[in-house]
Image: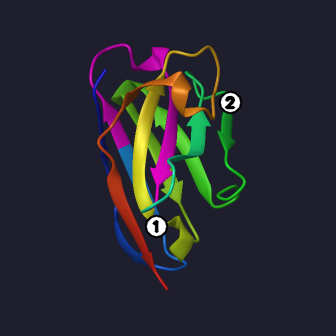
């Protein structure tokens, strides 16, 4: 599967952005989806994950209550709604697809990765 992320940009602290990731192919609903991010000089870290039919979601503590992951299997798309953005949210955001049985916070469980979209939050 090929993944194409979009929606990043420059926003002031307290603002919002919605990222989208479109997957190619007809088997999107077979994949657990996740969002990760990587800031300059730091490891890529987990942000949020969603199960195949969106029954289960899980977000990192650092974004819980501010970010929401969702998906539309009819559109082969997973979203990340980001509210109350902080400068520390600045990073390249990546979407990823996993063939794992359930939601996962582990990078190694994800088989396919998008190219990333830059999110910059100014103070």
Determine the residue located farthest toward the front in the rendered image. Answer: 41
Disc number lying in front (2 or 1): 1
Residue 108 in picture, x, y percent from top left = 53, 27
Residue 123 in picture, x, y percent from top left = 49, 86
- Residue 40 numbered mark, or none: none
Residue 8 in picture, x, y percent from top left = 34, 60
In the image, what residue occupies the spot 49% across and 75% down?
15
Q: Quadrant of the N terminus?
A: top left
Q: Which residue position is annotated with label 1?
A: 90
Query: 88 and 103: which one is in front?
Result: 88
- Kindly indicate the quadrant of the structure image that contains residue 51: top right
Q: Which residue position is annotated with label 2?
A: 56
**Is 6 one of the magenta-colored residues?**
no
Query: 22 and 105: which one is in front?
Result: 105
Q: What stretch is highlighted in magenta?
A: 21-39
- Kindly indicate the quadrant of the structure image that contains residue 69: top right
Query: Alpha carbon of mark 2 to alpha carbon of mark 1: how far?
Result: 26 Å
Residue 44 in picture, x, y percent from top left = 50, 47
Q: Residues within 10 Å of mark 2 (few under 14, many from 20)?
A: few
In the image, what residue occupies the spot 57% across and 22% down?
53
33 versus 82 height, above or below: above
In the image, what residue occupies the spot 52% across and 75% down?
87
Task: Report whether residue 23 is seen.
Answer: yes
Q: How many labels does the image show?
A: 2
Q: Is disc 1 placed on a helix, strand or loop? A: loop
Q: Give whichever of discs 2 and 1 has the lower sequence position.
A: 2
């Amino acid at each position: 599967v090929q993944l194409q992320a979009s929606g990043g940009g420059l926003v002031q602290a307290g603002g919002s952005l919605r990222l989208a990731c479109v997957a190619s192919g007809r088997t999107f609903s077979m994949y657990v989806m996740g969002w990760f991010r990587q800031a300059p000089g730091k490891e890529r870290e987990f942000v949020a994950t969603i199960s195949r039919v969106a029954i289960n979601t899980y977000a990192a503590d650092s974004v819980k209550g501010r970010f929401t992951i969702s998906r539309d299997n009819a559109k082969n798309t997973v979203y990340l709604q980001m509210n109350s953005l902080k400068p520390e949210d600045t990073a390249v955001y990546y979407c990823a697809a996993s063939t794992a049985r359930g939601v996962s916070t582990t990078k190694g469980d994800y088989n396919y990765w998008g190219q990333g979209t830059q999110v910059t939050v100014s103070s």
